[in-house]
Amino acid sequence: MDTIELAQDKMNKTISVLNGELGTLRAGRANPKLLDRIMVDYYGTATPVNQVGTISSPEPRQLIISLWDASMIPAVEKAIQKSDLGINPSNDGKLIRLVFPELTEERRKELVKIVRKKAEESKVAIRSIRRDANETIKKDCKGGTITEDDQKRMEEQVQKATDNAIKEIDRIAAEKEKELLSV
């Protein structure tokens, strides 16, 4: 894999990480992805909640967790209460219900700030990838493995990949902000 492909691959991974992080922010709707990062002690092993039961969303602001092992209900409830979701689970002995309250205007603005911060962190990571790729290209030119013309062409390709990645990050962040601010 050459320097440019490697840089593009890293940029794509950065964008997919951003997508995953923004997917865990709740926007007034209940999304099963919100529980992806919540871990529960499953027979001595830290396991994501989505791997100890089925998560469904029967209503826009409600999630239901149907556990495969009913003895896990207290552990899952405790893990959800400890998380940063700010939701109190309730159970009927078989299912755990999570009811998401409507977001306040203040909370929406806080979430938008988080989105912007994560987008900026991703842009910094993209620029770092660009810098590393350009350094590698310069080393190759000094080492005589590529010509100066190749160096210029490759640096332009890296810059184009960087511009595209940053545009994609801006698009993803704007989409999430719009989702958060729509009532």
Image (cartoon, rainbow, N blue to C red):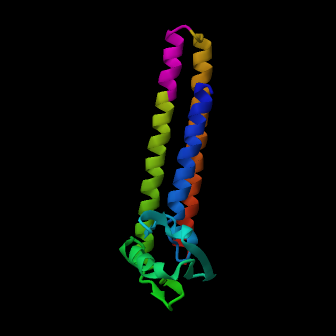
Q: Position of residue 140 (x, y in %)?
A: 53, 15
Assess whether residue 9 is covered by the magenta stretch.
no
Looking at the image, is 46 positioned above or below residue 146?
below
Furthest residue in direction left, as rendered: 82
Quadrant that contains the N terminus:
top right
| Relative horizontal placement of residue 81, taking residue 170 as reference (left or right) | left
Looking at the image, is 170 positioned above or below residue 49?
above
| Magenta stretch, residue numbers | 133-144
Quadrant that contains the C terminus:
bottom right
Q: Position of residue 161 (x, y in %)?
A: 60, 36
The residue closer to the viewer here, 170 or 4, is: 4
The residue closer to the viewer here, 33 or 123, is: 33
| Residue in view at x 62 percent, y 16 percent | 150
| Residue in view at x 55 percent, y 59 percent | 174
Furthest residue in direction top, as rendered: 144
Furthest residue in direction front, as rendered: 43
| Relative horizontal placement of residue 107, taking residue 130 as reference (left or right) | left
Q: Quadrant of residue 107?
A: bottom left
Looking at the image, is 141 positioned above or below residue 96?
above
| Relative horizontal placement of residue 137, taking residue 118 as reference (left or right) | right
| Residue in view at x 57 percent, y 51 percent | 16
Q: Position of residue 181 (x, y in %)?
A: 52, 71
Q: Position of residue 102 (x, y in %)?
A: 49, 83
Looking at the image, is 11 positioned above or below residue 25?
above
Most common SS among magenta residues: helix
